Image (cartoon, grey):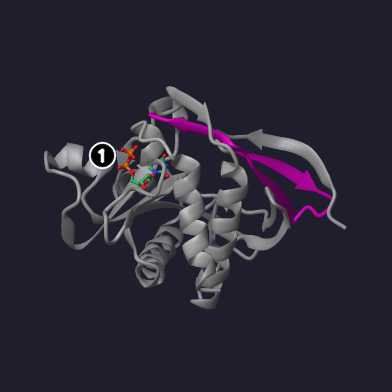
Amino acid sequence: MVQKLQLLHEGKAKKVYSTNNPHELLLEFKDDATAFDGQKKGRIREKGALNLAISVLLFEYLEKENIPTHFIKKISTTEMLVKAVKIIPVEFVVRNWTAGSLAKRMGIEEGIKLKKPILELYYKNDELRDPMINEYHIEAFELAERQHIEKAKEYSFAVNDALIRLFESVGIILADFKLEFGIDSKDEVVLADEISPDSCRLWDAKTMEKLDKDRFRRDLGRIEEAYREVLKRLETRR
Ligand code: UDP
């Protein structure tokens, strides 16, 4: 029986608890939503449960695709048990279509398919608003070991290939997404955090309707319905 012990960390969308097993943590998904580095705040009904269900489904799928993840098991509608890992303080953003900060930075419109995927690295630091960095910064500031970054890069592209295929099969375009990785007790790199419409840009392939957090960022409404639609479509693939 898993015991939920001490609250170790409360993030914007999740809480992390210790458990009676020092090698395992419990993640609780919240309904809170934030955007623009926490400047915009809100609550989306059922978001915690929807993001958890989608993340579980995607982690299970990726494990089958030989990508190791921190996921152990689902505990409740909003809680999952995960491996305790040391999080690499780098966000790995993979892009297939122009959107968000890439469109802005390059002065280009959204919704253009890229000739090949782009991988970007960001330093995970709320105070600094997650600045973009490269591998030289990671080495110079010793944010992570070189071999771990190499592995995480390899997994980022493997996750992209696998998720493009999965979403395509349910009529969804995977425009971009963010991944986080951790190092487990055996010094192996594993996929961590969550993969959900909070961390991905998902567009309906027919209508190009947004099915992700941009509905919250841009006040498009029907957020919960969009997240539910993503889950519903993925469930048909089980
Ligand atoms: N993303 C995320 N967390 C972050 C920053 C970005 O999950 O702290 C995701 C975001 O949802 C999108 C992708 O990473 O799917 C690329 O985001 P972008 O750099 O365009 O930033 P945005 O303009 O969305 O903040």
- Position of residue 185 in the picture relative to residue 51 (left or right): right
> Residue 79: where, in percent of width, then height?
70, 49
What kind of secondary structure does the magenta stretch mostly adopt?
strand
Mark 1 neighbour density, 10 Å: few (under 14) some (14–19) many (20 or more) = few
- Quadrant in the picture for the N terminus: bottom right
Residue 122, position in %: x, y? 36, 43
Range covered by the magenta-colored residues: 14-36
- Label 1 beta carbon within 8 A of ligand 1: yes
Residue at (47, 64) in percent of width and height: 233
| Residue 25 versus residue 10 in the image, above or below | below
* Residue 25 visible (yes or no): yes
Q: Position of residue 17 (x, y in %)?
A: 73, 42
Give ligand 1's quarter of the image: top left
97 above or below 39? below
- Quick one: SS at disc 1? helix
In the rendered image, which residue does mark 1 sit on? 101
State the residue lying farthest toward the right. Answer: 1
Q: Confirm whether the magenta stretch covers residue 41.
A: no
